[in-house]
Image (spheres, rainbow, N blue to C red):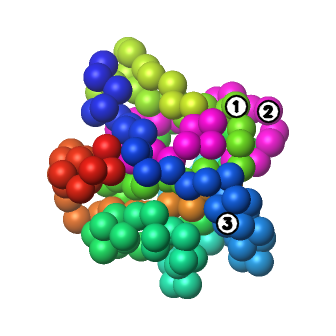
Amino acid sequence: MDAHDYFCKLHIQPSADQINELFQWQSSYNYEQFWFTDEHTGEEVWDGNYLARDIKDIPECVKDLYPVALELAGSCMLLKNTGNVPRHDDMYRQASVTIPLNYTETYTTFWDEEEEHHLKLYHRGAAYLQNNKAVHEVVDSRGEFRHFFQINFFDHSYFYYRDLLKEHGYI
Ligand SMILES: [Fe+2]
């Protein structure tokens, strides 16, 4: 597995002060747990992610850090989870820039197409571009919330955004 087919660490990273500022800012939002209807069983599935969607007032520091990503973005959202997200690929998103708003040791596991091999993404406070169409999960449950600000891309594949962000020096 080539890690860059699944996630890429960004060259431009928020400072500790910016992360703290973003963490304070997100606390005023209401989060709702994400759920969907299982196409086979017809049952509601609650996947352990909590979202505040469609954030319009993008903080200045995110605008300063990732202007090109914001230009390409379909939407921005806040996401938090406690490290217990079952294996899935995202229904709508192709890719996302994921900025952690707190430091955790909990990782996201990415699987290859055959789901035989995997790679672990430890954010450890760093922002990444992620391939949301690759199968991924969070199994390391310490019960601590992981908080993220996410810039979402819908129109093209992860590889399209990866190449474009590379051209702009993000990767
Ligand atoms: Fe996901």
- Asked whether the viewer can see residue 118, the reply is yes
Looking at the image, is mark 1 or mark 3 earlier in the sequence? 3
Residue underneath mark 1: 105
Q: How many marks?
A: 3
Q: Is the residue marked by circle 1 packed among few (<14), some (14-19), or many (20+) residues within 10 Å?
A: some
Residue 168's image quarter? bottom left
Percent coordinates x, y for residue 18 in the rendering: 64, 62
Looking at the image, is mark 1 or mark 2 earlier in the sequence? 1
Q: Nearer the viewer, mark 1 or mark 3?
A: 3
Question: What amino acid is found at the position of numbered circle 3 in the picture?
Answer: Leu
Q: What residue span does the magenta drawing correspond to?
A: 123-146
* Residues marked 1 and 2 touching at CB (< 8 Å): yes
Residue underneath mark 3: 22
Question: What amino acid is found at the position of numbered circle 1 in the picture?
Answer: Glu
Residue 92's image quarter? bottom left
Query: Of residues 51 and 44, which is closer to you in this image?
Result: 51
Query: Left of 135 or right of it: where is 126?
Result: right
Residue underneath mark 2: 142
Query: Left of 35 or right of it: where is 143?
Result: right
